[in-house]
Image (tube, rainbow, N blue to C red):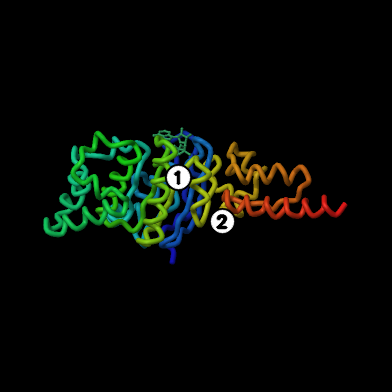
Amino acid sequence: MTFIKTENLSFKYKEGEPEVIKNISLEIEKGSYTSVLGHNGSGKSTLAKLICGILQPTSGSVSVGGYMTNSERDIYKIRESCGMVFQNPDNQIVASVVEEDVAFAPENLGVEPSKIRKIVDDCLKTVGMEEYALHSTYKLSGGQKQRVAIAGVLAMSPSCIIFDEATAMLDPTGRKDITTAMKKLNKEKGITVITITHYMNEAIEADRVIVLNKGEVFLDGTPEEIFSQVEKLKSVSLSVPQVTELLYLLDSDGYDFPKGVLHTMQAADVIEKKAAGLKKGVSGT
Ligand code: ADP
């Protein structure tokens, strides 16, 4: 079932300036996990803000769960159902104690205090931060803060969360924790996840990858389909996961390796099979 639909969506920040989103028509399924890639300035953040109704289309339309972002009556429904997690967790954390921060949204939505306790506990557990409920938010690491920020968004029971470069400021461990949390939200809670990222290892976890270039959809497919197009990605200044690049280079050197291998273990398997073949060849001569 389609959850997000953009129809001939175009957007420019100012009259007289060029469009930064150009005639995009996309459908995103409910419960899916999509990664949006693109070089700096390709329009990723603008698209995310158009989906959440933070920005309004210059032309065309966006609907989320059947509600239109350009309808004043619908916009509150969209803001309730579609949360965003941004790059800098410090800009999203509002309270000095972890559990107070997570309780902020339900308190403001007027949820009964007896229910808030359970919401806070559940949300902290989902992001693996339950042991930090009474900790000061400012003493946490970047990755822990970002997990608290995610719990804060979760406390609003969104159907969809857009992560806008949410791992960009984190170290590799923090990045891995957030990617794990995104996967869990999608697979266990059925939340529609859209992640805007520069990290290919984050993108390969998605079911679908959309590549933007100069405000247009350049590629759209499964991670395997997208990352097997190494030359095309390079033409828009994007790289591929390291193991994909390695096998691509070996294949280009005539070793005949499959395209679109994304995971290290999968690559190890493919290389082992090839090496076993070579070994037999050597012993047979
Ligand atoms: P990305 O997220 O892919 O880096 P953005 O959506 O942030 O791309 O930006 C797309 C284009 O819109 C860029 O050319 C950028 O300079 C421009 N842009 C982004 N935000 C604004 C703004 N607030 N006002 C004017 N132009 C903007």
The image's mark for residue 116 is none
Q: Is residue 141 above or below residue 268?
A: above
Which SS class for mark 1?
A: strand
- Pointer 1 or 2: first along the chain: 1
Residue, disc 2: 222
Residue neighbourhood size for the residue with mark 1, other residues' Cα within 10 Å, grouped as few (<14), some (14–19), many (≥20): many
Indicate the quadrant where residue 98 lies: top left
Q: Kindly identify which residue carries mark 1.
A: 196
What's the CA distance linking mark 1 and mark 2? 15 Å
The quadrant in which the N terminus is found is bottom left
Q: Is residue 133 left or right of residue 272?
A: left
For image coordinates 29% across by 44% down, the residue present is 149
Label 1 CB-ligand 1 distance < 8 A: yes
Given the image, on which type of amino acid does mark 1 rest? Ile
Quadrant of residue 147 in the image? top left
Residue at (38, 49) in percent of width and height: 162
Residue type at mark 2 is Thr
- Residue 272 as seen in the image, left or right of residue 87: right
